[in-house]
Amino acid sequence: MPAMARLLIQAIIAVDNRGVFNMKPVAFKAFILSLGLVIGSLFCQQADAAVVTYTNRTTWSNTVKDNVLDTFSDLAGTTLPSTLARPGYSISSTTLFNIGTLLRTGNTAAVTTRPFLTSNTAAAQTFTLNFTAPRTAFGVDAFVTSPLGARNLTTGSIIVTVDGVSLTQSTSSPTFFGFTSDTPFSQVTIQKTGTILQLATTALSIENVELATAVPEPSAVATAGLFAAAAIAAARRRRAAARSAENADAAQA
């Protein structure tokens, strides 16, 4: 259990043992408000997007749900706009100087069974994906090819960034980049890196874009349950103490 969770549960028990839950209504409400502000502040400090990265699609898939997979199988043509609308997101292609460049599909026979999206020129360095609605999980296969849509794989390096967290991998074939986050995000950037020669003679390419929802970790669910259990236990102790006091008063009478 996280240390913060233990401290909060201990605090609930401690204040109950001191009779805080037997305070008069006005004082009790003030205490609850103060406690809520403290807890909220602690959670806000913990809420800096906890982004987890994955390099294995199967492992990533086991942590997400509501998957929407885009294989680009509906696309055709060697010239597509620099910004392309896709299911649940849009994708744009830009150069090092943030100048828009055209997208395209591959043009080899292999594309009919394994389509991919690539830049129309080697000048494109960055793909930016903007989601229609925020998501908490994202996966993509990214790689570097020869220019002009040929699926001739070559070596390169790619950086994928989600909510300020980057995953960098060397590629010589389609390489999986996966992310989950405890806070929704709306944008992903995919960037080709390397020497000037590499940037000028290779094309950034992607396939199997997948948008999804991260499944909360069991520990997070368990922690929420422990908070509820601690609060219920405190209330039961308060009621039991009140009944004992009433019985004692009745016996004395």
Image (tube, rainbow, N blue to C red):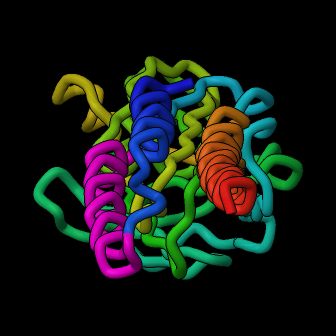
Residue 59: image location, x then y, percent:
75, 27
In the image, taking residue 178 as reference, residue 73 lies left or right, namely: right
Residue 100 in view here: yes
Quadrant (top left, top right, bottom left, bottom right) of the C terminus:
bottom right
Q: Is residue 160 or residue 26 the one in the foreground?
A: 26
**Numbered-mark total:** 0
Q: 20 above or below 104? A: above
User: Could you tell me residue 6's position as x and y percent?
Assistant: 48, 28
Looking at the image, which residue is at 79% across and 62% down? 66
Give the prevailing secondary structure in the magenta stretch. helix
- 246 left or right of 190 in image: right
Q: Is residue 196 toward the left or the right of residue 159 in the image?
A: left
Compared to residue 107, the image places residue 90 above or below, namely: below
Q: In the figure, 86 relative to 166: above or below?
A: below
Judge by depth and name the residue closer to the eye, 59 or 28: 28
Furthest-left residue in view?
97
User: Which residue does the image show at 63% across and 54% down from the upper left?
Assistant: 245
Name the residue: 58% across, 67% down.
78
Is residue 23 covered in magenta? no
Q: Position of residue 40 (x, y in %)?
A: 33, 59
Taking the image as shown, residue 200 lies to the left or right of residue 182, namely: left
Residue 203 can be seen in this image: no
Which quadrant of the figure has residue 1?
A: top right
- Judged from this view, the residue extending furthest toward the front is 253
In the picture, residue 3 is in which quadrant? top left
Instruction: Report the span colored magenta.
Output: 24-49
Q: What residue is shown at x 42% (from left), y 36% (from top)?
A: 14
- Observer-nearest residue: 22 or 213? 22
